[in-house]
Image (tube, rainbow, N blue to C red):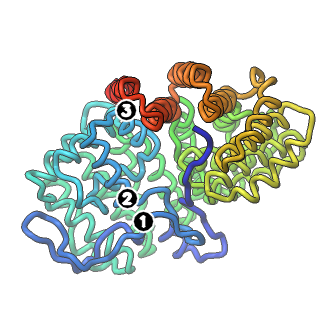
Amino acid sequence: MGIGLSGCSLFNIDSENSDTDLLKKSIIDTASVPSPNEHYDSSGKPIPEKIRLAGGLTLGDTGNLAFTAESLGGVVKEMIESERWNSLRNMVALYPDITTKIMWGEGSNQLSASHREVLARALDLQWTSGKQDSWQSFVKQQYNQGKAGSFLENRNRFLAFLQINDTKSAFSIQLSKSAEKSNSLIAKAESLRLEGIAHLMNEDYENSIKSLSRARTLQEQSQPIQAAHTGLLLGEAFRHADQLEQWQKSWLTAIELQSQYAVEGELKDPAFWSKAAFLRPVSTEWPAEVIGRLEHSLRNENLEFGFSESSIDEAVVWATIGIQSLKRHESQNSILAFKKSEALVNGVSLREELQMQQALAMIDGGQQGPASAILLRLGSQPSLLGDRAKAILATLKLQNGSLAQGMNLLQSAIKTSSQWPAHERLRAQADYGLAYLMRGREEQGIGLLNYVYDEFIKLQSYEDASQCLANIATYYEKTDQKAKHRIALKKLQSFEIR
């Protein structure tokens, strides 16, 4: 199983940029929508030779993503066609922001109307609240027989004009009228949000506040995650209008809502917290209740803050950004966030825990050399942290083919694993199981992987559980045990439809 993940960067604000540049970076993905002058064929798809979407890892670009809408659309299509329903639900849970872009028709021309309906259902089950509107109804209306509806076409043209600072042309589209005709609250909220952004770009703060306020009110009914993001934008409009009390109130409302979902819904939205940290009103402290929720989620990663100082509060936020980015395999942002958090704390043990997380993020991003240097230093200590570091080093040894060294390190480290964070312990045990298989000890290896699978299911860690089953199936395939391989594949398929 191991830690051999792939990752990249999502969001990073450069505080030296001007307000206008920051605004565009914060609200507009410049590789997401077609040119405003694109023409559409009879199926509603843009005619070829338009703006190309950047996929995969592009280090150094502050817009780096684990997935673009285009690349995630390809993954979604494969999952639906292979009936990997559990993996699809997990993907939607982890990337609601990018899934929402697909709903808007960004970078997803490879998906059919039926594909979009399945994806919309998964998005509604996980993140849509209330019964007034849903993505399923929106998709059925806007993608009738595969053709993008007029609102979607107008919405993406409006956004494309904003990307080139042409707000006059954007407003000429009359997006709100198009949304009214769609009879969709989701469409109405989005039209108001985009028009609010355009007003903000025009420095028309009064109309920006009106539009963004109405958008947030509509989103609160069914799209609470989007409502929190709109709340940050609304705060910016209040700030520019010198309505400082309203700015503070809007910011507080946004982070309160988002922190609830971070704990209760296990929402991973590091871009929100990055923006919230940058846009925090100068005289406003992080609320104790919000920090308490974030601290609660960090304890699962063995990060225990437990102080009440403004610098520690900020450290909690950046550690949260680091953990959430790592979960989403956005390693570069994760590393930077952990470094920022580490710089704000004084306790040696907490700093070392943050360094451990940095090492995990480096491994996730393929930087095994720097990660090993951190782990070797931490692993030299006779402590629980040292044993945990040795276990991760052992995994790297096993992945590189150093079976004897890896097994010896694991045997040395795993003695204290009952006191480790649950996920670390189970991943180490899974690696131990793989090491058994690599040494020909099938009974012990399969038994340990099956045990770890059951434990991951209890923790609702479905990605790790699926990897255990996939490893078992791969082992039986490689050892030409056809009957056992068929049984393992059947179990894996059953897992996907659970």
Q: Give the structural element (helix, strand or loop) at label 3.
A: helix
Q: Name the residue under label 2.
A: 71
Q: Mark 1 points at which residue?
A: 55
Q: Position of residue 126 (x, y in %)?
A: 38, 34
Q: Position of residue 414 (x, y in %)?
A: 77, 27
**Marks 1 and 2 close (CB-CB < 8 Å):** yes
Instruction: Say whether disc 2 or disc 3 marks the residue closer to the N-terminus.
Output: 2
Q: What residue type is labelled 2?
A: Ser
Tell whether 488 sits left or right of 433.
left
Q: Decide: few, some or many residues near mark 1? Use Cα within 10 Å; few <14, some 14-19, many ≥20.
A: some
Q: Give the structural element (helix, strand or loop) at label 1.
A: loop
**Toward the viewer: 339 or 450?**
450
- Up the image or down, 205 lies above or below 467; here it is below
Q: Residue 86 carries which label?
A: 3
Residue in the image at 66% along x and 52% along y? 363
Tell whether 373 sits left or right of 268.
right
Instruction: Give the CA separation, mark 1 to mark 2.
Output: 6 Å
Q: Where is residue 286 in the image (x, y as percent from the top left)?
A: 69, 44
Q: Decide: few, some or many residues near mark 3? Use Cα within 10 Å; few <14, some 14-19, many ≥20.
A: some
**Toward the viewer: 443 or 361?**
443
Residue in the image at 56% along x and 68% along y? 62
The answer to which quarter of the image holds residue 136 is: top left
Q: Which amino acid does label 1 sit on?
A: Gly
